[in-house]
Image (spheres, rainbow, N blue to C red):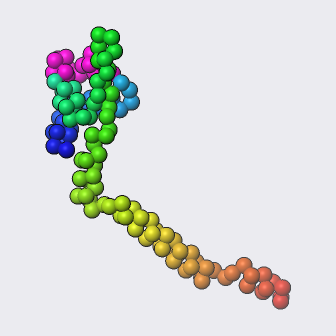
Amino acid sequence: MDAVAQALADPTRREILRILRDRTASAGSIARAFPVSRPAISRHLRVLREAGLVRDVPRGREREYRLELGALAELEAFLRELHGESPWHRRFDALETEVHRVRRERRQAAIAPSHNDTKRKKETA
């Protein structure tokens, strides 16, 4: 988790991950997207690779990089823990929403005359 957090701390590396979110890309094409040298981008890619955030696959003379989201799992779990979320958190939220919906429907039913009451009044008139 520490390596992932350190890799994400750099804005250039975060932008590289955004580029790789939608497609694979070579180091050269990634480097062209930044105003820094190709060796600098290679160092950023190495940090991302060592953190498990990207994977490289040889394609001829170049290497294609792709995003690996699995490395984020431990960090995401830690952040959920900080937010106090558990698997039950969403279930309790859904239950609370359902309770409020049922209460609202009951209040509306108690206020509005029922369809049968309106029909009876018309028949007796």
Specify the quadrant of the image occupied by residue 83: bottom left
Image quarter hosting the C terminus: bottom right
Give the residue at x 29% y 10%: 61
Of all residues, the one furthest to the bottom in this rendering is 124
Q: Quadrant of residue 60?
A: top left
**Number of on-image labels:** 0
Q: Which residues are magenta?
A: 25-42
At 31% across and 60% down in the image, what residue appears?
A: 85
Image location (x, y in percent) of residue 121: 78, 86
Majority secondary structure of magenta residues: helix
- Classify the position of the N terminus by image quarter: top left
Q: In the image, is residue 43 above or below residue 105? A: above
- On the rendered structure, is 90 left or right of 33? right
For the point 32% across and 32% down, the residue is 67
Q: Position of residue 70 (x, y in %)?
A: 31, 40
Residue 82 image position (x, y, % from top left): 23, 58
Asked if residue 32 is among those painted magenta in the image, a careful observer would answer yes
Residue 28 in the figure: left or right of residue 108: left
Question: In the image as oriented, which residue stretches furthest toward the top?
Answer: 61
Vertical side of 21 occupied by 56: above or below: above
- In x, y percent, where is residue 49? 22, 29
Q: Is residue 43 above or below residue 11?
A: above
Q: Residue 53 in magenta?
A: no
- Viewer-side residue, 30 vs 118: 30
Residue 75: tell me if it is visible: yes
Q: Is residue 29 visible?
A: no
Q: Residue at x 28, y 49 (%)?
A: 76
